[in-house]
Image (cartoon, rainbow, N blue to C red):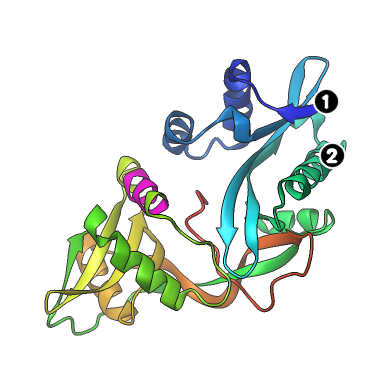
């Protein structure tokens, strides 16, 4: 049976989650405390056991419409390679169509999963540019400060200007949640100032700049490298690294799209 989870399933779902995603226990705690909801979690249950699950989170993709973001898709180890995830995702597609959603999107956890999801009807559509910054630029006139909720309109304006043709629309609450999550998980969100005016932002966690948007990328990374005393890996808008996939129920979006800060 495939159905939405109930509150009584939370302990079993958390156990499967920790089995499938053991790398970041602090994030797992945050997700189940702040973001998890049974009514957005699909479970495949047989013989009274939850054998597979997936979060089905609703977002809006510019140029496409409402979409489901499949997140935390996992099958218990002893039940893998039995087609359970295929059944679960096919069920989610039917749910999407009944709700009038235009597509299902996801971010595969590793490269082999791109082939797995391709066989289920997804195609690679979302790309980023990733790099490692080791140099130093002249940063005269520029400085960093921590972001606040007051910076959200600026951050969203810069994001929508630079993210390209197709991207997830971000609400005010979306931005607040991401800022609070990064800080809870020992990260930080920075604003780049030029002569006191905001000209960029960056989400940083664990020696990794997960998203940086600014016309002054090298300058902002120079300031951050100086702050942390080490080279930094970073991600921004671009087309060199495939990161996400889409299964469209109608006309697919044209060209390459951007997808990031989706709990990935």
Residue 64 located left or right of residue 203 = right
Relative to 48, say whether 106 is above or below: below
Counting labels gives 2
Give the percent coordinates (x, y) of residue 54.
Answer: 67, 38
What residue lies at 71% left-to-right and 46% top-to-bottom? 99
What residue lies at 87% left-to-right and 36% top-to-bottom? 82
Quadrant containing the N terminus in the rendered view? top right
Residues rendered magenta in the picture: 174-181
Give the percent coordinates (x, y) of residue 203.
Answer: 35, 59
The residue singled out by tag 1 in the image is: 1
What residue lies at 25% left-to-right and 53% top-to-bottom? 149
The residue singled out by tag 2 in the image is: 87
- Farthest-out residue, right: 82
**Depth check: 169 or 246 in front?**
169
Relative to 98, say whether 102 is above or below: below
**Label located before the other in sequence (2 or 1):** 1
- Provide the secondary structure element on which disc 1 rests: loop
Check whether the beta carbons of the residues at disc 2 and disc 1 lie within 8 A of each other: no
């Amino acid at each position: 049976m495939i159905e939405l989870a109930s509150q009584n399933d939370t302990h079993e779902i958390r156990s499967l989650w920790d089995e499938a995603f053991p790398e970041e226990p602090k994030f797992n705690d945050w997700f189940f405390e702040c973001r998890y909801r049974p009514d957005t979690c699909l479970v495949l249950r047989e013989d009274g056991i939850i054998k597979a699950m997936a979060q089905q989170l609703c977002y809006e993709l510019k140029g496409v419409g409402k979409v489901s973001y499949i997140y935390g898709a996992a099958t218990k180890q002893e039940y893998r390679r039995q087609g359970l995830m295929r059944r679960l995702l096919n069920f989610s597609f039917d749910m999407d169509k009944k709700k009038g959603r235009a597509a299902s999107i996801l971010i595969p956890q590793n490269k082999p999963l791109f082939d797995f999801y391709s066989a289920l009807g997804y195609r690679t559509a979302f790309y980023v540019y990733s790099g490692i910054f080791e140099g130093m630029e002249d940063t005269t006139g520029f400085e960093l400060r921590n972001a606040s909720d007051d910076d959200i309109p600026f951050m969203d304006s810069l994001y929508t200007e630079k993210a390209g043709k197709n991207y997830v629309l971000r609400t005010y609450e979306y931005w607040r949640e991401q800022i609070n999550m990064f800080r809870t998980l020992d990260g930080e969100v920075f604003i780049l100032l030029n002569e006191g005016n905001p000209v960029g932002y960056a989400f940083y966690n664990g020696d990794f700049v997960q998203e940086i948007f600014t016309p002054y990328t090298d300058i902002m990374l120079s300031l951050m490298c100086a702050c942390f005393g080490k080279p930094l890996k970073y991600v921004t808008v671009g087309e060199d690294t495939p990161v996400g996939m889409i299964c469209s129920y109608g006309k697919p979006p044209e060209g390459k799209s951007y997808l990031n800060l989706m709990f990935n």
